[in-house]
Amino acid sequence: MYTFGGSVLLLAGCRDRGENVLNADDYNRFTQEFVARRNGALKSGEEAAWLKGVDPSNQALVKHEKMFFANLRKVGFEQLEFVTEPYPLVPEPQRYTKSLTHEHPIAYKVSMRSKLSFDRVASEADYTYIFGLVGDTWTLLDFGPDTEDADTRYDAPWDLNALKVVKAGDVLLAADSSVKDFEKYAKVAARASREVRALWGKHAALPGFAVFLTQSQKNYGSWYGKHDPSRTEGMEMTLREKGNIEQYAGARVIINLANSLKGGDPFSALKHEMTHAIGVMLQKPTIALPGAGGALEMNTGVPTWAVEGFATYFENRGVPRKVANEAALVGDGIRKGLLRGDLPRNKGFYDGDEIYFNYAVGWSIFDFLARAKGHETAVAVYVDLLTHPAFDNMQGADALFDSLYRLKLQSEPFVDTRNSKFWAAWKAHVSRF
Ligand SMILES: [Zn+2]
């Protein structure tokens, strides 16, 4: 029985290597050395250095590590490094083993800190690495994403699928092997970016977009965590900066060609998701507010009707067919009684069939603002909403009225839907749909 320097985890029956007894500090050092060697490999491009210490008997793991390394080299990060904390953790099987049969496996949390040139700052993804001593070699036995930390995103496309990568204007475009004619989408994406920037105008903007394409429902449904691929043509994922609750670090866009090609090409979906992404330089992140007992009771955030309504407004602008379709959804929903005297709240916004009305009613607010006060005013109201998060019991029309008051588009500081002149005028307008 030995006492270990680290004292975090008791490693019973730790092995002897000749004269030396290994303790937790030694294992920490091995892990630091492993990670440092990999950071060197990412710089030098030496695959052999990246693969050194990966369990050669675990073919699925070796295959993943080769793919991951090739992807990371292709993407062209401005900053990319793996970091680990010197605290061993209790090991459990991850993605590439069913059971840990090696003697004394140990887990470590390893984070990938990365920044693309147009991200505001670096963001992190956390992984669990399982190591063991095989002979004299500190060996990576298994690996998987750490899905617990709310500050990190896991299952980025480069973690899961071999990617082709191309740069087009301010767009970094990557696709998996399901996408044929990949190069032609680079032009579509660059055009979507130009149109979104022209509509966005003078406001602070994300300087570039990272877009990932797939035609595989399975791959799309696994990117950035499991989700139902049948419901969307694309998604925008915000990235957090570790330890900063005030600002986002950047954004990623994923496009589901299996769905978006049904409308012809992914141009609309790209425009919609890029509209979400362009504002992340300004957008205040949602913050969960715990009650006195510690349970999550409230949040502050940007109203979802505004986020989705505004992206739909950019997507539809100048396309009469889409505008008519959106107006019909608003009219039908109002006749079915879906308006309920307020704009939809964040909770339940995406649920069931009302999702279509919820998007459309959000669109109608910005479309009406543009008709009544001009396109720039519609954008200014959205920017104001992005930068002034609302409590979750005020994320319907209350948030809109506060914004209109701040921008001097409404003279009274406190109104509700029963006495707001804006609401009455908007309602008269949409009642004709
Ligand atoms: Zn959206």
Image (cartoon, rainbow, N blue to C red):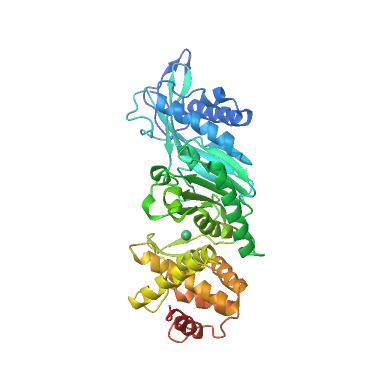
Residue 124: image x %, image y %?
A: 53, 44
Tell me if residue 325 comes above or below residue 151 in the rendering.
Answer: below
> From this viewpoint, is residue 122 visible?
no
Looking at the picture, tell me which residue is in the foreground, 33 or 95: 95
Residue at x-position 35% and y-position 27%: 100
> Of all residues shown, which one is farthest toward the top?
18
Looking at the picture, tell me which residue is in the foreground, 147 or 17: 147
Residue at x-position 59% and y-position 25%: 46
> Of all residues shown, which one is farthest toward the right?
202
> From this viewpoint, is residue 184 visible?
yes
Q: Which quarter of the image is occupied by the C terminus?
A: bottom left
Residue at x-position 47% and y-position 76%: 398
Tell me if residue 35 comes above or below residue 218 in the rendering.
Answer: above
Tell me if residue 298 comes above or below residue 149 in the rendering.
Answer: below
The reply, left or right, for residue 283 in relation to residue 6 is right
Residue 110: image x %, image y %?
A: 49, 37
Q: Quadrant of residue 92?
A: top left
Residue 214: image x %, image y %?
A: 46, 44
Q: Which quarter of the image is occupied by the N terminus?
A: top left
Residue at x-position 59% and y-position 78%: 373
Looking at the picture, tell me which residue is in the foreground, 175 or 301: 175
Q: How many marks?
A: 0
